[in-house]
Amino acid sequence: MLQNKYVTMEEQLKHFRTILDTVQAGINVVDKDGTILYVNDAYCKMNGYSKEELIGKSLTVILPDQNQQKGLENYKKIINKKIIKPTTVESFNIRRDGTSFPVLISWNYLVKDGELEGMVTVIQDLTEIKKVKKELNQLKSNLQKREYLKYIMGDSPQIQEVHKAVENVAKTDFSVIIFGETGTGKEIIAEAIHNFSNREKKPLISVDCGAIPETLIESELFGYIKGAFTGAEQTRDGAFQKANNGTIFLDEIGNLSLETQKKLLRVLQEKEVQKIGSTRKEKLNLRIIAASNENIAEMVKNGSFRKDLFFRLNEFMIKIPPLRERKEDIPLLTNRFIKEICSHLNFPQKEISPQAMELLYRYDWPGNVRELRNALKRAVVVSGKKIEEHHFDFLEGFGENLFSVPSKNKVEFNALQNFDLKNYVKKHIAELEKEVIEQILEKFGGNKSKTARFLNIDYKTLLKKIKEFQLLSDR
């Protein structure tokens, strides 16, 4: 009956206009000649037109100027040859002002008595949907990152505080100092800060300042041009150029000389870097994360670290507690390490006995998580189906009785008028330090890497101490 009453397409549209104007999706009806017969309010709002500007006009008015005639020809070709099928696709819609927004477009043909009369297009604005989807994906990603951080570092209350600090500072561009003993996982925390930040898709470049000789550290950090010095056969970016727009992680930053610290401070203040031998400065946009197993504030006090650089870096500090202060993480870390080690070695998965786990609890782990992992590597290799207490026999003696310390010295006051407490204490501390290093080196058969890890000092510091105390002269 409706078909009898409403003879033309225009008459049929009149009946539905009020209803169509309440729909949030944009609707556009064009006849076979390319004339716009109808648009609803939502379509006009999306595209920045009024109905009067569109209805009765050629569809060229909604096409970019350079594509108007070609667009009309393509439309007529589509209608006449019916060369596209009715479908729904995601695309972008261009507004009157030239801006674009994501849309879901559906179109279908208008048919009357078997003849094509035109086309109807429905456009749904996906801007808010895309925004919500992005937020949900970010929440999902952050949840996965939190679970991974828990898996890697543990879940004790102390480590949970570290997790919270990571997420809080990651939202900013603050410079961060990470302080923790050797083997506590400072690089893992630096990676987590980067991955939780809006720079996660950009590079994270790590530099071990304790492993690079002083003569090379400047070229490693800032790069150099061809011919800048002997051996500079080609221009090379330094760590700062490689990390641009991302994050640079300077591990064991306390090992940098005061002269290098001065140059680093200039780069951070000016946010520019200059390759060795070059006169051109390159702009920088990056976050800096520094780490040390020494208390940098104390280094500032004793003059081995620049105060101005410390203040520039110390916008946020994260302290990672040693494993002996968070032993509730040992079961989680132990089970993870055993699983990873067995998988890496293609061994069947192994269990650890309650007695062996108790032994791991009792031990103080001076080398922290790194030492725990290495101990488990050895235990996995030497054990059968189950890791037992005796598989950690090599840990015995690694406690407070590993080496003896000098007994209390009786102070001789032969010349009270010349007594200097500061020098007296300094002398005996040096003697104690020498004796401890000497005994640990002997324990490890002169292996300096193992000695440095056990003493919780970096390798470069140990070499300086060996030279200072003239140790290992017969090795």
Image: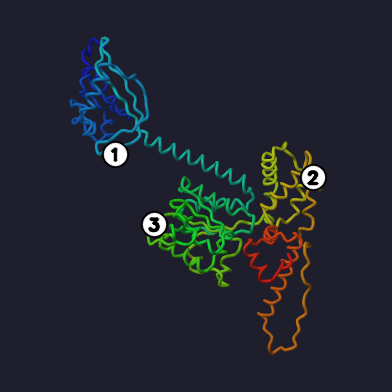
For image coordinates 51% across by 41% down, the residue present is 141
Residues marked 1 and 3 touching at CB (< 8 Å) = no
Q: Residue 302 versus residue 25: which sits nearer the camera?
A: 302
Between label 1 and label 3, give the one nearer the viewer. Answer: 3
Query: 270 left or right of 310?
Result: left
* Residue 231 coordinates in the image, percent (x, y): 49, 59
Q: Find disc 1 in the rendering and name its residue.
A: 99
Residue type (three-letter) at the residue carrying disc 2: Glu
Q: CA distance from mark 1 to mark 3?
A: 31 Å
Q: Under tag 2, what secondary structure?
A: loop
Q: CA distance from mark 2 to mark 3?
A: 57 Å
Q: Residues within 10 Å of mark 2 (few under 14, many from 20)?
A: many
For image coordinates 80% across by 51% down, the residue present is 393
* Residue 424 coordinates in the image, percent (x, y): 69, 80
Residue type (three-letter) at the residue carrying disc 3: Lys
Q: Find disc 3 in the rendering and name its residue.
A: 283
Q: CA distance from mark 1 to mark 2?
A: 68 Å
Q: Residues within 10 Å of mark 3 (few under 14, many from 20)?
A: some
Residue type (three-letter) at the residue carrying disc 1: Thr
Q: Residue 379 versus residue 113: which sits nearer the camera?
A: 379
Q: Under tag 3, what secondary structure?
A: strand
Q: Residue 111 versus residue 307: which sits nearer the camera?
A: 307
* Residue 20 coordinates in the image, percent (x, y): 29, 25
Between label 2 and label 3, give the one nearer the viewer. Answer: 3
Lower position in the chain sequence, tag 1 or tag 3: 1
For image coordinates 37% across by 33% down, the residue present is 126
Count of all numbered marks drawn on residues in the image: 3
Query: 137 left or right of 75?
Result: right
Q: Find disc 2 in the rendering and name its residue.
A: 388
Query: 307 left or right of 62?
Result: right
Lower position in the chain sequence, tag 2 or tag 3: 3
Q: Under tag 1, what secondary structure?
A: loop
